[in-house]
Image (spheres, rainbow, N blue to C red):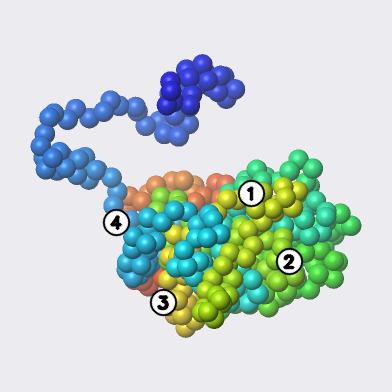
Amino acid sequence: MRYLSLSDGDREEMLKALGLPSQEALMREAVGDVPFTDVPDIPALSESELARRIEEIASSNAYNLRIFAGGGAYDVHTPSVVNHVLLRSEFYTAYTPYQPEVSQGTLQAMYEFQSLMAEIAAMEVANSSMYDGATALAEAILMAFRLKKKYRVLLPKSLNPLYRRVIDTYLPDFAEVQEYSYTASGEADLPELLSLIDDGTAAVVVQSPNYFGILENLRAISSAVRERGVLLVVHYDPVAATVTVPPGEVGADIATAEGQVLGLPLGFGGPYVGIMVSWKRYIRQMPGRIVAETTDVDGRRGFVTTLQAREQHIRRAKATSNICTNNQLMALAVAVYTALLGKEGLRKIALTTYSKTRYFAENLPEGYSLEFTGTPFREVVIKAPVPAKELIERAAERGFLLGPAVPSLGENHLLVAFTDRYTKGDVDALLEVLKTV
């Protein structure tokens, strides 16, 4: 047991707490009715023979699916130059950027990431990345609590449900969370939102485009919210921000985003990278670490870790977060991707993404309908003539991955997402598949 963290007794205690009779019953929750089988009987083989046999077994898996699934992670194109830079040994094998004396090359990469993210959001300062979009948003709420010294936050019911679960995990017991609804357009119900703001409210969170893919009227929300003296936290899409109003222009106090859409592959769910942007007046309450440009004694340009207000670097009561580091390798990938495309390249991808979304929405086959009337970006919620789970399975059999289902709206509702990776011809092929289902 020297190297194993759990004993049989520990496992039995956990299963008892879960109300499950066995470990197999626990796994059954994940695999459903799929039968458990023994390891395939593979005889002693040479390396090349074994590789061929494993490939034969793996060939039963579904490959080359055209992925139109969304819900927070998207099948975007990753230019080859991103990996060529990312996998250089100087970056790929470096120790986590944890200490203030980290190398100049890593510090400059962090600084460039910050600069690019601040420019896209039209705000003044960005930290050098968070773990992912969900933790960035949760940390932004804690930051708002510190700034206002109040502990009530308003969240939209159109927020990504995975983000909501992370927020619930993050928030202390004494924090209060209130939800506001959305209208038939899929946008925030502004009158209801305003009615929920009281003297104890620290911040209002809005996601745009929201979980349903609908762009919010950020100007109207910001104007109304700021009049009531609370902070506005905007979770945005950094690609969409290049063709819509960025959070800084509407006066958001803190902005967060998932950086995966900026050239990171799906990677079976990660690793991704969180973006957090704000204003200089709030900088001392920003979590994570912030790199700044300076000059050395000889007047040469250099970079330093300016702020990293965690408990190892500051008195514990003054620490902003227990986040130890940043997702530097992924932040580097995002910086390379963003610099490679530039403003016009990002705008082109944004417009292409928007055009595909609109084209799909306007050409739905008979029997399908849009759930919301608002302006969509990247994804839409459709109501299908069959249960969403069945549609997803049948579309996968025909080479298209859709979803996820949105059971909160009904069993026939699901998301369909669009990126720069697939062509109009792929969208037409998907529409034909929907007709057959």
**What residue is pinned by disc 4?**
64
**What residue is pinned by disc 2?**
282
Marked residue nearer the N-terminal end (1 or 3)? 1
Q: Position of residue 231 (x, y in %)?
A: 77, 64
Mark closer to the observer (1, 3):
1
Mark closer to the observer (1, 4):
1
What secondary structure is found at the residue carrying circle 2?
helix
Left or right of 406: which side holds 96?
left
The residue lying at 48 percent from left, 31 percent from top is 29
Residue 372, located in which quarter of the rendered image? bottom right
In the rendered image of this protein, does residue 28 appear above or below residue 56?
Answer: above
In the rendered image of this protein, does residue 405 appear above or below residue 370?
Answer: above
Left or right of 401: which side holds 55?
left
**What residue is pinned by disc 3?**
340
Marked residue nearer the N-terminal end (2 or 1)? 2
Marked residue nearer the N-terminal end (1 or 4)? 4
Q: CA distance from mark 1 to mark 4?
A: 47 Å
Q: CA distance from mark 3 to mark 2?
A: 30 Å
Mark 2 neighbour class, 10 Å CA radius: few under 14, some 14 to 19, many 20 or more: some
Q: CA distance from mark 4 to mark 3?
A: 27 Å
Whether the residues at callouts 3 and 2 have beta carbons within 8 Å, the answer is: no
Q: Is residue 348 visible?
A: no
Q: Residue furthest bottom?
A: 344
